[in-house]
Image (cartoon, rainbow, N blue to C red):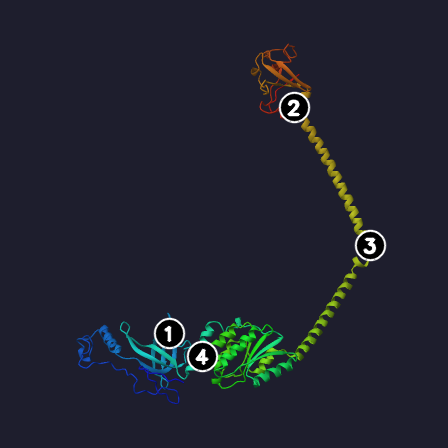
Amino acid sequence: MSSPLDSTGTPLNTGRTGHLDPPETMTSFQPETIAGQAPPADSVHPRDSSTDAPTSVSRLNDTIRGFIERWGSVWVEGEITSFNRRGGNVFGRLKDLGTESTVAFRIWSSTLNRLPKDLKVGDHVVACVKADYFPRTGDFSFAISAMRHVGLGEQLERLERLRVQLRSEGLFDPVRKKKLPFLPHCIGLITGENSDAEKDVHRNAELRWPRVRFRTQHAAVQGDRCVPETLAALKILDADPEVDVIVIARGGGDPQTLLGFSDERLLRAVAAASTPIVSAIGHENDRPLLDEVADVRASTPTDAAKRVVPDVSEQRALVSQLRARLTGRLTQRVLHDIAQLEQIRSRPALRTPHSMLTSRAQELWMLSNRGRDIVDRRIEAERRRASELGAGLRALSPLATLARGYAIAQLPDGSVLRDAAHAPAGTALRLTVEEGTLAARSEGGVPDTVPHGASTSGRDTADDAESSASADRPLDDEAPGDGVSMGRA
């Protein structure tokens, strides 16, 4: 265990309780004075102020700050009673170990990165502090430039830093850990040669599953050879395709002898291995970091054998139990299906199917006849309606009008003649009658005073026709009432 240092780097003495004994070289809170040099001109002395001539708060605070700034740094021991992070900095309080005295401290973010990451309330620490005073608010606190736990040796402190680093990298995360196979065909074992751990793993594994096979690689489990030999054995077994799981076993020991299983090289190799790894170091109080990185942690080599290999008797009992459960479920299902079939068979449809078929056939015949009658009646009604529409269409057709003795007169350009004034004498006309077309020529208009029934030579000309047809439609598309010019032929 290393002792805390004072502001000059000299180790401080500690008693049996681990508290720091006041060293003779510890810096005291005394202002640094230089012989022959007067205090600052603007400093305040009690004799410089009176009721009639008081000093200002600003001058008082500046004087206090100037006095405090000449103090040096000092190492102080205490317990953290408050530890709050704000804006990347830490503000807290440090309490004396024997009394209720406390001081406020602050740790700037730039300094915080150099301190232990696991500082928290309740920690027993030693810190290098320097007093500081803020004139604007009159606040007094100590700035910490270094802090460390009391009672941690260099090796343990290094392991704690490594633990924090590996945890931050996710090597302890349960999500990345691999599952063990249900029944490994071959178990890789890394342990000391002829060790009790090797015997325990073999004996308990073979008792649980007699046909289990091992690939054993011996390695030193303590000392300088521990890490390199364990790394070499791990590399061999991890590359063996027949090895389904690897057990690293040791039968406990002194914490100092277990440091090899907290080596960073070994831990990273275990994390990078493709084969599931079981840590069975067998030490409950001082667990190495291998227990945190391995996929499964076993308390002892015997426990490792139980975790890796299933018990054949337990598996046989489980198979028998599952077989009985399956038989019961199948029997229950078959009986249920038989009951359902009997219920279905008892229904009238299956008990007397012929009568049901006969009834359905009669219904089908009746529906068929009814549908046929409905269709026939509908067809007859539509036929009558079509005949009526055809008769009406023929009655409205211009050809029907021609059949009654009328004629249609057309000018040479094909337009229908509506006004006798449009066909002066000599105009060629085209007369359409029911049976054919005639060529005619107009002889001029006929006076309206001609007696009814009088005969004229131009009676069959276009000026005797009644013009009432549209001039810009084809003849066959025009109907009476649309302006077709007709006259009795």
Q: Are marks 4 and 2 in contact (CB under 8 Å)?
A: no
Which secondary structure, mark 3?
helix
Image location of residue 212, percent across then percent down: 64, 78
For residue 112, the mark is 1
Image location of residue 296, percent across then percent down: 55, 76
Residue at image position (30%, 78%) is 130
Which of the two residues, 385 or 318, is positioned nearer the viewer here? 318
Which of the two residues, 448 or 11, is positioned nearer the viewer here? 11
For residue 421, the mark is none
Residues at marks 3 and 1, CA–CA distance in whole angstroms: 97 Å
Q: Which residue is mark 2?
A: 398
Q: Are marks 1 and 4 in contact (CB under 8 Å)?
A: no
Q: Amino acid at mark 1?
A: Leu
- Vertical position of residue 175 compared to residue 209: above or below: above
Precedes in sequence: disc 3 or disc 4: 4
Which secondary structure, mark 1?
helix
Q: Amino acid at mark 4?
A: Leu
